[in-house]
Image (tube, coloured by chain):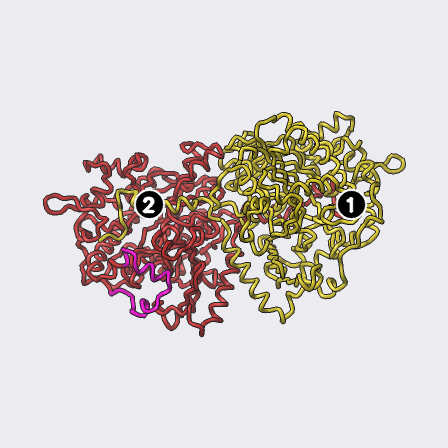
Chain colours: A red, B yellow
Amino acid sequence: MSSARNVLFIMCDQLRWDYLSCYGHPTIRTPNIDALARKGVRFTNAYIQSASCGPSRMSYYTGRYVSSHRAFGNFVPLPLDELTLGDYLRPHGIRVAIDGKTHVEAPDPNVLSRLRIEPQSEVGQLISQGGFEPFDRHDGVLADPHDPEALSNKYTKFLLEKGYESINPWLDYANSALGEDKVVLSGWNMRYADLPARVDEQHSETAYTTDRAMEFMTEQGDRPWCLHLSYIKPHWPYVAPDPYHHMYGPADVVPAVKSEIERADPHPLYASYLKHRASVTFSDQATREKVIPTYMGLITQIDDHLGRLFEFMEDHGRFKDTLIVFCSDHGDYLGDHHLGEKELWHDTVIKVPLIIYDPSAAADALRGKPCDAFVEAVDMVPTFLDFLGIAHAGDVIEGKSVLPLLRGVGGAPLREFIISEFDYSFRTSTRKELNRPVKNCRTLVLRDREWKFVFCEGMRPLLFDLQADPHEFCDLGGDSRYEAIVERYSQEVAVWLSLRKTKTTASDEYVENWLGLKRFQGMKIGEW
Amino acid sequence: MSSARNVLFIMCDQLRWDYLSCYGHPTIRTPNIDALARKGVRFTNAYIQSASCGPSRMSYYTGRYVSSHRAFGNFVPLPLDELTLGDYLRPHGIRVAIDGKTHVEAPDPNVLSRLRIEPQSEVGQLISQGGFEPFDRHDGVLADPHDPEALSNKYTKFLLEKGYESINPWLDYANSALGEDKVVLSGWNMRYADLPARVDEQHSETAYTTDRAMEFMTEQGDRPWCLHLSYIKPHWPYVAPDPYHHMYGPADVVPAVKSEIERADPHPLYASYLKHRASVTFSDQATREKVIPTYMGLITQIDDHLGRLFEFMEDHGRFKDTLIVFCSDHGDYLGDHHLGEKELWHDTVIKVPLIIYDPSAAADALRGKPCDAFVEAVDMVPTFLDFLGIAHAGDVIEGKSVLPLLRGVGGAPLREFIISEFDYSFRTSTRKELNRPVKNCRTLVLRDREWKFVFCEGMRPLLFDLQADPHEFCDLGGDSRYEAIVERYSQEVAVWLSLRKTKTTASDEYVENWLGLKRFQGMKIGEW
């Protein structure tokens, strides 16, 4: 299809699926995202592959589950053999760039030096950026004051140019507030969430990142591109610039989804998470009433800037040739289930908003419709390839194109269940408390329409009856009456694990066309 | 230990565990290997990780199971991230070289070009050689007349220098015989197995490869080395030079280990293998009586040359500072179980001879003793490292050092069961007959002291009661009376698969020392 040319791949960080107006939040205002949903398809059962930035994003970028791409945690590099979006699109003349956050970790220097790859070479850079051209990468939260590299990023320079003088203006201005007597109050302390950021709104991360996206589109003109517009917000630090810091108040905060049943006889892993600082903090309604209005303000800010961007794109004809995806890398407990932060297994954190706008006429029939099919982060790479008419063999990518769901030509559902994995090895307190070896801290959610089963390496699994208990309060994994169901799902998990596409160095085609020793002078094994 | 300096890693190809005199064969003569067994420890339960050259060797070279290194078949490259023996030893100043066969497949050119690695560069070469310096690599059977590269190897040049004129002297002389009227009879046809090869014995592969090992040792002097002396024989073509072609006769051939029970109601995968050409051919006793004497001759030839080598090593003091390992990459059915060739699951093919000579005084007590512990091919890399005093973190290598078993300081057994995997996707006839997708042709043997359980992807498993049925004739995998046992082992396999060390890009140490966001200005997640 000749009109299929570009992909705008918008991601928010830590945006819950239910904190958008079009997804039913009663008080938040997100008119521009809602408008995109009216132009495209809004997925109501979209899941990410790990409730943690790094592994989730690596699944988005590779089209593969965490067990396959093996970047199991934040700050864990992808293996060198893993192909990303850039590897699939760039050979077709498409510019593939990052504007914002990727959370891609560069390989260990020893890995590169073993292969004599210079980290600063073009290929070294691409590997370190997950295959994206670093048009303007700023991972924000990761700015390490001890790392001059991190502080030389473009957003830091921009802030310095605007007069925000500091070793780390990202931290000291964009993510801090000012207290009485001009004391700088770090956004890391949630108690200051109701104060405005020390930057003008137009200099905030969200505004800056959006501006850069427009610059990129302008620069690229009619040449094809795939831009990963990746907002750092509403991820903590929960600090919003004026007026977004006081746009919402306690009255706008919906109640926490939690029950005392959950804490009555908790699974050991859940019990450990209940003790984390963020869980304790968010269990206090005062925290929620202080932080959530700002979380909501940060979302409305993104929405406002997306409004600006969409108008720009309309003006430049980009709604005619661009696939637009709006999604998130995972949710945020915000006190639900007595937890803070993300990780673990509840839909609160593994379900995300996903809106896809397909410019093709073939997609007209379903515009504005919701779709309740199970879709996953791994589906994005194959969807982009499908939209752009680029074939792939299918023996490395594990996701499936959702294009048929946008165009109403889908037959069988893409899948009967979703999978989301999480590895808690980096959570030192929990790993030590549970006495687990580093390599064996895997959890895996298998969720279908009826049940949510959570495999926990070395521990009993958890089980939730989603029909009777849609909020996932009551863990039946230790209840002997559910033994047969636990057994069935344990087997499903084993089969699923055995089906991972890990044999990546020989394609199906290679195996199928293998002539065996016939290639060697017609040799035949065992000829008499 | 200052005397621990070198490793001589001798491998035969397709040598059954039971075709050596010291392993109980009644008629074969292997006095030099027997002598090595008297100086070292002879393992009576040594298993390889796949009954196929390539994947078995990749496990020997990486210390990892096939599911982890993922080079699941012959001609399947290792992923670039996989570390081999050379990667572990070379940084310690040890020269690591191959003399003979490795069956390492070079990566796909696209993989290298994506990383801008020149195939002919030093690093490109090391990758293509599995980390071995190609001192004299000749994979023999793989010499492809259409590939000038393959035919430019040193053994080919040697044969040409000696006057064996041909495009492929390896095939036309070293592995062919001469018939009446000077017709060249290819060794691929087993019916000529009783005729002598068209080369002088001293120019045969086994003699040449041994000569080169001595050259290597001479060249290296007292500088440390690890030499992989890897004989192509007794792998087919079953052609031996005079006098080894007529050293044994039909009277020396032991009966085939097989039963009609096996063919009564065969598992579909086994049933398909029964139809393979090699199986049909070896089911005929006439074939066995023609081929096995030559197979035995080739083994005795290796033994004679090892005698020469060991004498040379004694003369040069190398028995004082060299760990010597003698092993095989897998067995050969030779008509047992109505099968020819290897692959599948019987001990005939997954059990191998393994003799280890440790020069240390600490090993004196156990010299000449057999050891019935379960040891595996993956144990060799960590054993070499242990012997040489090189530490490794243990979170990539899956095998375990057997040094304690050589020195009588072992406590708990290394393991309770062995694992051997085989992927039949390259066996086109079988894959198509069973209608299996390319990526899902995995089989996995879990063998302990009592049972052998064979997981077959997409099919029912097989089960053998090794106490009641040590020859593995009676498959109980479909018998409902054994359901509980099948269930137990299915779960064992699932657990084993989930424990693979696939998280190779972040070490345990990295995770354990992770300071989290504390590295970034003392940031604390969820701070109130």
The residue singled out by tag 2 in the image is B515
Query: Does residue A273 show up magenta in the picture?
Result: yes
Q: Is residue A147 left or right of residue B161?
A: left
Residue B28 — which label? 1
Above or below residue A448? Residue A141 is above
Q: Position of residue A64 (x, y in %)?
A: 46, 51
Of all residues, the one furthest to the left in this rendering is: A181
Q: Are marks 1 and 2 in contact (CB under 8 Å)?
A: no
Q: Position of residue A212 (x, y in %)?
A: 30, 41
Of all residues, the one furthest to the right in this rendering is: B181
Q: Is residue A10 left or right of residue B102?
A: left
Tell me what residue is drawn at x 47 percent, y 70 percent. Answer: A485
| Amino acid type shown at disc 2 | Leu
Query: Does residue A10 show up magenta in the picture?
Result: no
- Residue A405 in view of the camera: no
Q: Position of residue A366 (x, y in %)?
A: 40, 60
Chain assignment, label 1: B
Highlighted magenta segment, given as a residue range: A255-279
**Frontmost residue, A177 versus A426:** A426
